């Protein structure tokens, strides 16, 4: 089973930047991680969880939601089992709990995946609050 832990959230002002991090580990620790893609999702108060960005674990191909395109960048460090979300030019509407997720589906290795049902491991989330 893949364990995911997010960090890096906080309270910032509009226009500021934040970098979220997510570390993946396995339980038991000696088992290997079989992950084909990683993703970031977010859930704002009173709204459903939505896709933010995804990255293929093997080839690094990424895809972003239109709402964050040009402002957010997803990246990874395979050696450290880490995935990052660099968020620039933050807006109040970016306020949400941000979740890291891992996909075990092999076709996600081509270009990532962007539907929640394609992920089976989720972190507990990290709060990002952007004030105006």
Image (cartoon, rainbow, N blue to C red):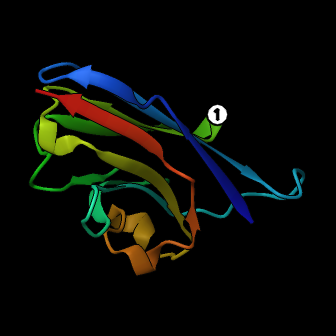
Task: Report the label total.
Answer: 1
x, y percent for residue 120: 56, 73
Is residue 51 in view from this perspective? yes
Number of residues whose C-alpha sits closer than 10 Å to that of mark 1, classed few (under 14), some (14–19) or many (20 or more): few
In the image, 116 versus 57, the foreground residue is 116
Position of 71 relative to 13 (above/below):
below
Looking at the rendered image, the quarter that the C terminus falls into is top left
Q: Secondary structure at mark 1?
A: helix
Q: Residue furthest bottom?
A: 117
Position of 34 relative to 29 (above/below):
below
x, y percent for residue 4: 62, 51
- Residue 22 quadrant: top right
Asked whether, in this view, residue 93 is left or right of residue 47, the answer is left
Would you name the residue on which mark 1 appears? 80
x, y percent for residue 78: 58, 40
Looking at the rendered image, the quarter that the N terminus falls into is bottom right
x, y percent for residue 12: 27, 21
Asked whether, in this view, residue 45 is left or right of residue 90, the answer is right
Q: Residue at x 42, y 33 (%)?
A: 20
Q: Residue at x 27, y 64 (%)?
A: 50
Position of 4 relative to 50 (above/below):
above
């Amino acid at each position: 089973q893949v364990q995911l832990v997010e960090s890096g959230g906080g309270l910032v002002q509009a226009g500021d930047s934040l970098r979220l991090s997510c570390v993946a580990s396995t339980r038991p620790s000696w088992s290997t991680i079989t992950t084909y893609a990683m993703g970031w999702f977010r859930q704002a108060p009173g709204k459903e969880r939505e896709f933010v960005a995804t990255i293929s674990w093997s080839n690094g191909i990424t895809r972003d939601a239109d709402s964050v395109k040009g402002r957010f960048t997803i990246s990874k460090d395979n050696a450290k089992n880490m995935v990052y979300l660099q968020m620039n030019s933050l807006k109040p509407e970016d306020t949400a709990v941000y979740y890291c997720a891992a996909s075990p589906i092999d076709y996600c290795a081509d270009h990532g995946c962007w539907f929640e049902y394609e992920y089976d491991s989720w972190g507990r989330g990290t709060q990002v609050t952007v004030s105006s």
